[in-house]
Image (cartoon, rainbow, N blue to C red):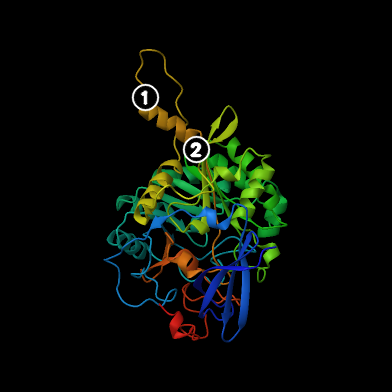
Amino acid sequence: MSPPRVLARTRSVCPECLARVPAQRVARGRSVYLQKTCPRHGPFETIIWRGPPAYESWAGLRLPLLRPGAAAGPSDCPWDCGLCAHHQQQTCTALLEVTQRCTLGCAFCFADAGQAAGPDPDLETIRGWFEKLLASGGPYNVQLSGGEPTLRPDLPQIIALGRSLGFGFIQLNSNGLRLGREPGYAQALKEAGLASVFLQFDGVDDAAYKALTSRPLLGVKLAALEHCAQAGLGVVLVPRLALGVNAHQAGAIIDLALKYLPTVRGVHFQPVSYFGRHPGPPTDDGRLTIPDILRTLEEQTEGRLQAAHFQPPGCENPYCSFQGNFRLQGGVLRPWARDQGGGCCPEPRPAAEGALRSRRYVARFWAGGAPAPEPGPAGQPGLGGWEEHLARLQARTLSISGMAFQDAWSLDLERLRDCCIHVMHPDGRLIPFCAYNLTDRQGRSYYRGPSRLPAARPKARPPASERP
């Protein structure tokens, strides 16, 4: 094996105390590790890339976002988010957490939902959040999250409020239990203006759900899909992938998604991350990286999906996610473009352009709608050539994507500054998703709710030469 190579120097945090520390990305063979040392707690290393595809071939070129209207002043990233002038991407999707209550106690949970949940924000508070998004450059795509948002009896009113204020794409992040158990509920949400459901969907048998949620939930998940289909809601299946639990079902989840086209608009894989609630610290053998998932999809679909069909994102940092668009043709998934993945973009793209393109794609292709129309009898009016083509393309399109969220072991502040998924803090600040959910080894948070850290801010600081 070739000797280790330092690819770049960056900054991270200590998993024990969350103090900001210097870090470096180091390549050993085809794998890349994030290494760092805390003055108080010593060295840490975690794998962040297990190629192929090769780490250096994956990233596209992107021009940084200039934010002349953002707050000025020095950055103490990640402890003064809001967003600051040093952040390099605008908002694509804004998450509004409308409750911390939950009906499940999952083994892995970003929000540690259901634990000491406080009162739900009232409608006027939520109105203020929508207005802050408009003032910051919106309307953006909005995801209503939590906790489990369907526990709120006024969820339809929240959706209708957002639509009345000009937010065209509102998505619900849900475990699907109420959607599956309550006929007519999906229709009520659709009538309020909901476009899409981001549905927790961890497997195609009850073993996966028992391992991750302690309950057999496949039946209610499938019922939720049926009810969303009847209501005309688009659904994105969201499997949390864990080795030894459900990673072996990734290909089967794709096959199930195809059976539910055009209701299912996409599958968005999320390898488990170690913040919020989790069983214990990660090991390299237990962590799934982006190349691991791409190879898994290729193997489990017997080559119908290939790593070359996927590409880095145009919105967030390229090492945060992957994405591919496919159309169902003759019963076979075919990529939109043969040259989508594995290499750099032909020329640098402005960050703002990537965010805008991502917002537009999600709003059109993740939303529900009627199945594509069949050609009408000769002489009868139809949709017209272009509109009919778009309707057919949408009905036969499946987005397959995945996101490797950063925890205290893998957090890279360069990646964090490229984040386009922002959570609305209760005080009205927009916080990058991985910073908002960041917790130390003991599960203590800095941003989420009242700080559970021993002090208001981690005390250890890197040497002055390492500060921005």
Q: Secondary structure at mark 1?
A: helix
* Residue 313, image x, y percentages: 47, 52
* Residue 183, image x, y percentages: 54, 43
Residue 132 left/right relative to 340: left
Q: Residue at x 59, y 40 (%)?
A: 257
Out of 27 and 145, give the one closest to the viewer. 27
* Residue 67, image x, y percentages: 30, 64
Quadrant including the C terminus: bottom left
Out of 273 and 212, give the one closest to the viewer. 273
Going from N to C along the chain, the mark reached first, 2 or 1, is 2
Q: Tell me, yes or no, whether the two marked residues, 2 and 1, touch with CB atoms within 8 Å.
A: no
Amino acid under disc 1: Gly
* Residue 297, image x, y percentages: 64, 46
Residue 337 — which label? 2
Residue 421 left/right relative to 236: left
The image shows residue 375, relative to residue 237, as above or below, that is above
Question: Around disc 1, counting alpha carbons within 10 Å, would you say few (fewer than 14), some (14 to 19), or many (20 or more)?
Answer: few
Q: Residue at x 61, y 53 (%)?
A: 291
